[in-house]
Image (cartoon, helix red, strand yellow):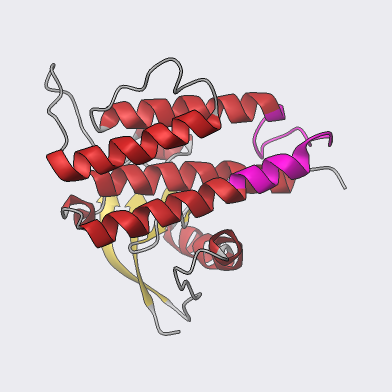
Amino acid sequence: MPSMDAYLEVGARRVFAGALDWPGWCRSGRGEDAALEALHAYAPRYAAALKGSRLGFEAPSDLRVVERLPGDATTDFGAPSAAPAADAEPMTEADLRRAQAVLRACWRAFDTAADSATGSQLRKGPRGGGRDLDRIVEHVVGADAGYLRMIGVKPSREEQAGPEPMRQAILAGLRAVVRDGVPPSPRGGKRWTPRYFVRRAAWHALDHAWELEDRIEP
């Protein structure tokens, strides 16, 4: 496959590289070259995550940087934080269906990794720190709830009770904001666009799926 468009989020100590058209495929490094190398290295894992989704992902032969974004403290802490300009574009119905398919594929990848980790010893250390499996699942659900609030959707307590109700809330909330628009924050705070919401939620699910895969003791 020919080259694919990518963007860079450049912090003081860490850089994230992301594929513009493939939410969730986003990795970091200590510099621009390292981030792009990490992104390219994870192409097979991203392809495996999307397998069966009929989205037609193929690893590119090359990554073409089309945008550089300034990072912030969140970037340096280890999470992407800046939205590429393309994420400001409104979503069509076709875009929404594709976004939902990407999210479902990333969730399946996380569930598969969690199932594999059940009953297994997880390595301690820098890759994922010391969280056990239950804490990782709780963390992902809690982060998803926070992400939903960034597009003006407040999940109920019941929807935050576990991965499946939270995912249903995400699909419904995403559809609502694509149809009606993201409501303004009552205090004038920051809001995300639907496209960036999908990019961030997909990244987070895959990041922890791959963390679990890397931490399972043989």
Range covered by the magenta-colored residues:
110-133
Residue 49 found in image quarter: bottom right
Q: Position of residue 122 (x, y in %)?
A: 78, 35
Nearest the eye: 74 or 147: 147
Q: Is residue 78 visible?
A: yes
Quick one: which residue is furthest to the bottom in this view?
Answer: 2
Q: Magenta segment, principal secondary structure?
A: loop
Which part of the image, by quadrant, shows the N terminus?
A: bottom left
Residue 189: within the magenta?
Answer: no
Residue 113: within the magenta?
Answer: yes
Nearest the eye: 116 or 136: 116
5 left or right, relative to 193: right
Report the residue at 46% width, 30% height from top: 166
Q: Position of residue 202 (x, y in %)?
A: 45, 47
Report the residue at 73% width, 41% height from top: 115
Q: Position of residue 88 (x, y in %)?
A: 17, 51
